[in-house]
Image (cartoon, coloured by chain):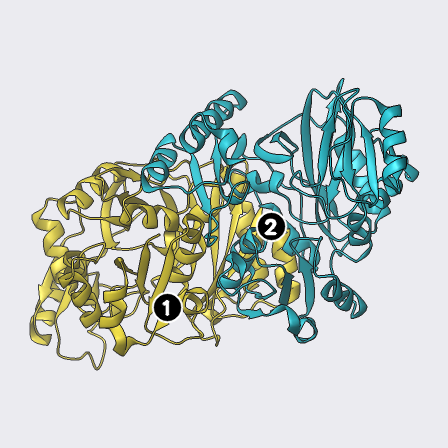
Chain colours: A cyan, B yellow
Amino acid sequence: MTRIGIIGSGQLGWMMILEGKKLGDEYYVLGGDRSDPASRIADRHFPYEDYRKFVDECDLVTYEFEHVNAEALEYASSKDKLRPGIEPIRLKRDRSLEKEFLRSGNFPIPRYETAGSLPELARIRKEFGRCVIKTAAGGYDGKGQYFLKDGDPLPDGLPEQKYVVEEFVDYQHEASIIISRSTRGEISAHVPSYNLNLNGILINSFAPSEDNGMFEISRKLVQSLNYTGVMGIEFFIVDGKPFINEFAPRVHNTGHHTLMGSSISQFEQHVRAISGLPVGTPELLRPSGIVNIIGTELNNIKKISILKVGGTQIYWYGKSEVRRKRKMGHVNCISDSREGISVKLGQVMAIVYGNDLAKFI
Amino acid sequence: MTRIGIIGSGQLGWMMILEGKKLGDEYYVLGGDRSDPASRIADRHFPYEDYRKFVDECDLVTYEFEHVNAEALEYASSKDKLRPGIEPIRLKRDRSLEKEFLRSGNFPIPRYETAGSLPELARIRKEFGRCVIKTAAGGYDGKGQYFLKDGDPLPDGLPEQKYVVEEFVDYQHEASIIISRSTRGEISAHVPSYNLNLNGILINSFAPSEDNGMFEISRKLVQSLNYTGVMGIEFFIVDGKPFINEFAPRVHNTGHHTLMGSSISQFEQHVRAISGLPVGTPELLRPSGIVNIIGTELNNIKKISILKVGGTQIYWYGKSEVRRKRKMGHVNCISDSREGISVKLGQVMAIVYGNDLAKFI
């Protein structure tokens, strides 16, 4: 029996526990509220200030989110218990470091430049024309991102900080891969998915997508980081060629489809990878997809309608409050064909959002 | 959000919670120890003496085991919260009532007679020749069952109580079906499985097996009981014809294979059926089987060996103590073919039990 610590108390930790529990381990959760999704099913919950005790009592520590809890992450790392390690977190804390790491490793990424000040940002932005400006620190789910057309002025009121300016990529679609590397050195990946994002937030996704070379790039990435665990890597596909948008050193929203119709979920894969167990090669048993439920409740009529679609499952995270842009749950579906999945995703989208998607996101 | 009460704290309740939690409901567990499998992940645990409070605070109550907790079951029934209802429990408390119900409904069952006393038992037993004697009360997992060859004397020290004497059925194999009927009246079933029992305890099972008419019989059975929830029905297959051995008014060990390679597990199916949600028709995505881990620990070397087989998952129930005949966990496996499943079951059996199966069971 292993005591697995999770830093963070949200839905990713919740699903990690639901999926990992079968192996008989104990799960301790650090931070957030006792009523948060992961805390409620953990064997123990530690308030954030007790992070040393939490780390000391765990055999190994992982995290469901990399943008907070610096002291806890570093303390776990200093005790050699943190998996994945601290290096990918360091890169994710500053988007310019992530970009620099990828560029210096010759990974395919969109052209970018780092701006250390607002005047520098203004200068670089002009060179790029149509572009995306991203704050170097703390961006996720579309936060701190600004899409500018050629000639657009800089948004008003940008604070003085570090930014990354990226060329605008006119991609055919977004795709991602969930890759894992175990403590035993095994590397394998789930079948890649297509992703649909709106305002930087994932709306729905489905597998299989073509590989387009994503696996090889991803294999090289986890190896070069000496990485342990599951990593979600997002790509832009341009003329059939993949460019890394960003990576997430953890289980990832675009891997939720693996909860249904796969031989193993990304969550169990992660638990196995970090705890010294064989991970094997995940198999996609059926075309499979998800719809995120964002910014809205799910009343009983909607719940019933979704399950009536057939080959569907609902994950409702049990968060205390509905907020705009907040991920409240998701719906999994499987089908015999990719066409069938597209139809089901459309049906579920219509049930969840009606014609009002923009209202919730 | 529904508050679902489970009477009983063992592995069936544990898996019901792990599988049902995705829907966002709360689970309250009654009875047993706080450290029991289901209690440890429940939202709340009630000691048995608080059964009225437990029932009062739940929206609906189900059970993972039908042979105990009579007052709680009856109190939940009196409050109209018990699903499945009290009638199948009444039949299961006295095997002669179960048999009588099945015979009077013209369900195919082996020939049997009820003996109300030891002298009557001796007389009937002689008429039957080779037969099985079963205590009418409390028998499960092979307890209270005696296999007698023609001419064998009655076992020594049988207590004065009611018995059922059954003809010995020379079956080709045992099979079972997991059928469900929802509060909405939908009836559907998982693909049937082959089962291998030893001393009345399930060792392994796999799906698909041929239907052989089991679904129609099972459909009639749940309808005639006006049943709600999942029911496991065990059959003897003789010359391709099914005879009901017994039914279990709950999720069942022979349905554990549905945890992997199925579109929905029996546990989620049960939760949906009793809580007014659509159940749909379960689909078997791959041939799928389980090996029970009985009476033995699983050290790390065995754990790794099992997962290295590939297409395998381990459910370890986390019981406090290993005892002979005690179900400690199980292994799921999927494969592309029935032959592949047989090979994997054999590999897993060898890892778990070596040559010493009889020592543990």
Q: Residue at 78% of width from left, 51% of height from top? A: A93
1 and 2 marks on the same chain: no
Circle 2 packing at 10 Å, graded few (<14), some (14-19), many (20+), is many
- Viewer-side residue, A219 vs A163: A163
Output the chain of dot 1: B
Q: How many marks?
A: 2
Query: Residue at left 11%, top 70%?
Result: B121
Residue type marked 1:
Ser
Considering every residue shown, the one lying at the far right of the view is: A104
The furthest residue to the front:
A157
User: Label 2: which residue?
Assistant: A267
| CB atoms of marks 1 and 2 within 8 Å | no
Q: Position of residue B48 (x, y in %)?
A: 29, 76
Q: Quadrant of residue A120?
A: top right
Q: Relative to residue B275, is residue A14 drawn left or right?
A: right
Q: Is residue A169 left or right of residue A111?
A: left
Residue A131 left/right relative to B338: right
Mark seen at residue A16: none
Q: Is residue A73 visible?
A: yes
The residue positioned 44% from the left and 31% from the top of the image is A353
Tag in front: 1 or 2? 2
- Pick the residue in front: B188 or A152: A152
> If the image is split into quadrants, where does the N terminus of chain A sit?
bottom right
- Residue A352 coordinates in the image, percent (x, y): 43, 33
**Residue A139: x, y in percent?**
71, 44
Q: Is residue A230 above or below residue B64?
A: above
Q: Residue at left 58%, top 51%?
A: A12
Give the spatial CA distance, label 1 vs label 2. Answer: 25 Å
Q: Chain of mark 2?
A: A
Circle 1 residue: B9
Q: Quadrant of the C terminus of chain A?
A: top right
For mark 2, give the secondary structure: helix
